[in-house]
Amino acid sequence: METETGASAALTMAMRFISYRPRSVKETAQKLTDSGFSGDAIEDTINRLKSAGCLDDERFARELAGSRIRNKNWGLKRVALDLRSKGISDEIIHAALSNIDASADAETAARALEKWTRKTGVKFPRDGVQPPEGAQPLEKKAFEKAFRHLAARGFSAHVIMGLLKRGGQED
């Protein structure tokens, strides 16, 4: 009887926890563990939520990846790191990120750079004004800061260099 009550309480807590926003299996199990539920109650709860379609790491990974890219202007590397920290397997991460093409990553990097330049006041050549032949569109120090900012947001060096050499403009 007590085990049934524990499982019922665990299910109630888990349902409340996942109702706020989508969660991974690991996050939900960790919440139940932190709340002092037994391993059997946690396992039963997780299995019931999975079979009901309430917990699905693949769907969670796709939704979170899209959200982080759209709302936080994160690159693929940063999104993968975030998903990994939430207990998502590398196979699921790869599947979730494989739907995002390189041009979308470059567009996200351009948005992140635009936001950063507004905050910092760094100016890029605009409206068809090109830097002199062979010159960087930014001073070296600003170029390095912009590179570090975008790298910290999870963009590849290839995407960053392409964007910065174009003076922050999307293709």
Image (cartoon, rainbow, N blue to C red):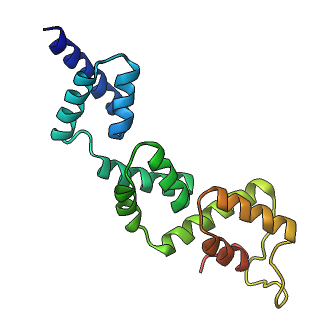
Provide residue 122's location: percent of width, then percent of height. Answer: 81, 63
Q: Quadrant of residue 151?
A: bottom right
Q: Quadrant of the N terminus?
A: top left
Q: Quadrant of the C terminus?
A: bottom right
Residue at the extreme bottom:
133
Between 110 and 6, the residue placed more toward the observer is 6
Question: Is 111 displayed left or right of 2 in the figure?
Answer: right
Q: Is residue 62 visible?
A: yes
Between 44 and 103, the residue placed more toward the observer is 44
Position of 31 relative to 166 (above/below): above
Position of 115 relative to 165 (above/below): above
Question: Is 154 displayed left or right of 89 in the figure?
Answer: right
Residue at horizontal 63 percent and vertical 60 percent from the top: 112
Provide residue 117's location: percent of width, then percent of height. Answer: 74, 61
Q: Quadrant of residue 8?
A: top left
Residue at the extreme top:
2
Provide residue 72's location: percent of width, then percent of height. Answer: 55, 52
Residue at horizontal 34 percent and vertical 48 percent from the top: 60
Q: Quadrant of residue 33?
A: top left
Q: Is residue 11 visible?
A: no
Residue at horizontal 26 percent and vertical 20 percent from the top: 10
Between 122 and 143, the residue placed more toward the observer is 143
Provide residue 158's location: percent of width, then percent of height. Answer: 62, 75
Between 99 and 110, the residue placed more toward the observer is 99
